[in-house]
Amino acid sequence: MDLRYPIGRFTFEGPLSETDRKNMIGQIDRAPSLLKEAVDDLTEEQLNTAYRPDGWTVRQVVHHLADSHINSYVRFRLVLTEDSPTVKTYDEGLWAELIDAKSAPIEPSLTLLDSLHQRWVMLLRSLSVGQCARTFIHPEIGAVDLDKYIALYAWHGRHHVAHITSLRERKDW
């Protein structure tokens, strides 16, 4: 297994069908509960264990999910209220090195992710096919439509939960 991509790299064959879109929004909806299950009963030592050599700790992964999904939610709102906005990027690796990502308790990020996903999923379930075709401009990758972004974030949650669950399996935690 590739420890960096335990469920494989993200791929997208769009646009999404209505069934695929509903499935992916369901995956986004379930991500906070799957993350909570993945970190349930981990000790401080386990939370501070990297999921792979030179990788983030479990704690950093949890905080990264909150950081990344906040940014994604804002991007969805921008694309729905502006014409093809250019979004701001951020250096997720540097964010993961900030003191709160490296040492804060995970509970605030778990709570934040749960609350954020409640609003985000409500928004996603309200989107029309036309809205899902709206785009934003990412400075590094160009135009991205919301169908692709829905698929990316369905994958993103599963991807990082798998980092934690595969570490638990390897370590027999």
Image: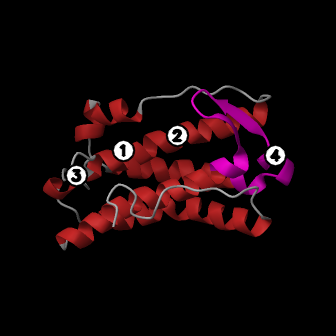
Relative to residue 108, is residue 31 depicted above or below? below
Give the Cα separation between the discs numbered 2 and 3: 23 Å
Q: Nearer the viewer, mark 2 or mark 3?
A: 3
* Quarter of the image where the C terminus is located: bottom left
Describe the element under mark 4 as helix, strand or loop: helix
Q: Residues within 10 Å of mark 3 (few under 14, many from 20)?
A: some
The span picked out in magenta is: 124-149
Relative to residue 113, is residue 171 depicted above or below? below
Residue beneath disc 4: 131
Tell me residue 159's x, y (percent). 44, 58
Describe the element under mark 2 as helix, strand or loop: helix
**Residue 50 tag number:** 3
Q: Earlier in the sequence, mark 4 or mark 2?
A: 2
Identify residue type, mark 2.
Ile
Residue positioned 78% across, 64% down in the render? 17
Residue positioned 77% across, 32% down in the render? 81
Tell me residue 152's x, y (percent). 58, 52
Residue that lies at the very extreme toward the right in this rendered image: 130
Task: Tell me which corner region of the image, top left, top right, bottom left or bottom right, holds residue 6.
Answer: bottom left
| Magenta highlight on residue 32 | no
Give the Cα separation between the discs numbered 2 and 1: 11 Å
Relative to residue 59, is residue 32 depicted above or below? below
Callouts 3 and 4 close, C-beta under 8 Å: no
**Residue 70 tag number:** 2
Describe the element under mark 3 as helix, strand or loop: loop
Q: Residues within 10 Å of mark 2 (few under 14, many from 20)?
A: some
Query: Relative to the observer, which residue lies in front, 92 or 7?
Result: 7
